[in-house]
Amino acid sequence: MFDTIIKGGEVVDGTGGSRYRADVGLRDGRIASIGDLSEARAAGVVDATAKVVCPGFVDVHTHLDAQVFWDSTLSPSPLHGVTSVIGGNCGFTIAPLTDDPADGEYLMHMLARVEGMPLESLRAGVPWNWRTTAEYFDAFDGTLSINTAFKVGHSALRRVVMGPDCVKREATPEELARMQDLLRAGLEAGAVGFSSSWARTHNDPFGNMVPSRYASRHELVELARVCSEFEGTSLELIPCVGPFDDDAVSLMTEMSVAARTQLNWNVMTVAAGNLDECYAKLEASDHARTHGGKVVALTVPMAFSVRLSMAGGFVLDALPEWESAMLAPPAEKMALLADQAERDRLAELAARPGPLQGLADWSTKVIFDTFAPENQQYRGQTVGQIAEAEGKKPFDVLCDIVVADELKTSFGTPPPVSSDEDWKARIEVWRDGRAVIGASDAGAHLDLFMTANYTTSMLGQCMRERGLISIEEAVHLMTDVQARLYGLRERGRLQEGWHGDVVVLDESCVGARPLTTVADLPTGAPRLYGEADGIDHVFCNGVEIVRDGQFTDARPGRHLRSGSDTERVDLS
């Protein structure tokens, strides 16, 4: 007797091998049988005739650390077939904490600035009542629709150990030892690794670099070394922005060797025009291999557009002297944008020469999503078109719309169109072995961009529309590759005895739907959101969490812990 039989589908098992027709029987959270189950009985049957049955997708780069407390579905990721996610990336975690509420307050402001999470949502939606990483994990384990795993973040460790000095100087030997102890405690609790960032774009809202950027090379390597004591851990790092220099390459190698595990660096976007640059950065993997380490690039599989919002103000806050206005509380910000003198002042500041001057070309911006009834007419129009029709200045038009929408308006540039040559360049990199598909950033940059739909975007655009990759290879590149890289035990493939993370999809229509803006965050803050076509059923640990493209009430996800749910990664 099975819990569920998925009947009559084409099994694409995640290994990259050819599809085959078979039934899949699920029992007690696992794949109990794959074959002819026509005579078997089950409590439930899913008709998968003419559909593909494949493993659940594994998303290795998310920032869902806070969302676990206000959205038990971790939407929209499961709607795109994702059944396992890894968070705690870039050094930005919300555990551990101390008894000093100022530490949690700092981490809230840092996340709001660098990861585009509304400060009011973080304050209202997250309990902030744990101290240890173990207590943080226990606070949500067993409450979610899909499987989660989290690293321990460097900036959180520095803040907890060094207090305000974390953004002033390098750590003393005693402070480094305390950070190592906290990291060790987190790994003992099941954290799956350590993450950090030296990216020059990562700055807190108080005029400082984020804490991890003040760390010495020695500090990074010695924290990475703690991971060598634990099975099934890994590293994630942003070593720099732009081309790698020798120091960045040697640092990643040294960290990987010290930790005796792989290091995944973030992030590489690929197109036909920058393929040579991408291959130059992939040479970091060759250097690591020759020195006994493993370094792998993280690459987002499609082009995407950036959408701007005055609500969060991310990116806009980098315009000259705009930071205080974009960091103001919502009511104060609306008052600023409604005041003509303040509008004129902001417009003049934004027009000053500088690297972001083009951002302030307001007339070219498209209005994507609006909320006030009187603003519905503006959807899809450029600010310039509206300004010409109404005889107003472009920035005044934008401010009028934004104020009427109570800051929730989404605007920006249309998404770039990828050519066949762009997709072929990406496929080259995916097949290279020195890169892995991911970089969804799910849970972050909530009003800026939304790439949690990368799985269905890749399947829809590259596989279904263009026919440039087989579904067998596409599934392999988004399931088994990630699971093996991160050492996830018995996940990433459809194999008897393995965990029942299964997707039933329609390859004739699979794809990502257009993005929209929904105001469903704590305190009603907005975020970008997108659903999928062709993801008919999703099972996590043998239980159906998505049916006909909609969430069920089931929450069978497990928190995956290093050692018990992960194994040591092969460095070859």
Image (spheres, rainbow, N blue to C red):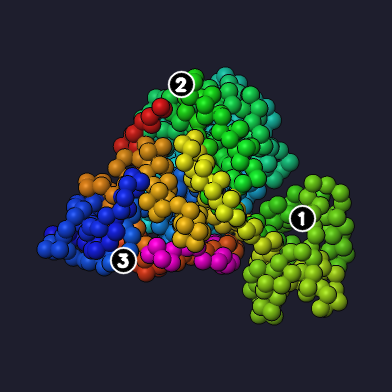
Give the main secondary structure of the magenta stretch: loop
Q: In the drawing, what numbered circle is on residue 359?
A: 1
Density class for disc 1 (Cα within 10 Å; few <14, some 14-19, many ≥20) is some
From the viewer's side, name the closer residue of 150 and 59. Answer: 59
Amino acid at pointer 3:
Ala
- Could you say which disc has been placed on residue 244 in the image? none
Please indicate whether residue 320 sits to the left or right of residue 549 in the image. Answer: right
Of labels 2 and 1, earlier in sequence is: 2
Q: Image quarter for residue 78?
A: bottom left
Q: In the image, is residue 510 part of the stretch drawn in magenta?
A: yes
In percent of the image, x 47 and y 28: which residue is there? 294
Q: In this view, does 169 lie above or below 539?
A: above
Residue 357 coordinates in the image, percent (x, y):
81, 52
Q: In this view, does 302 lie to the left or right of 504?
A: right
- Residue picked out by circle 2: 292
Residue 109 appears anywhere in the view: no
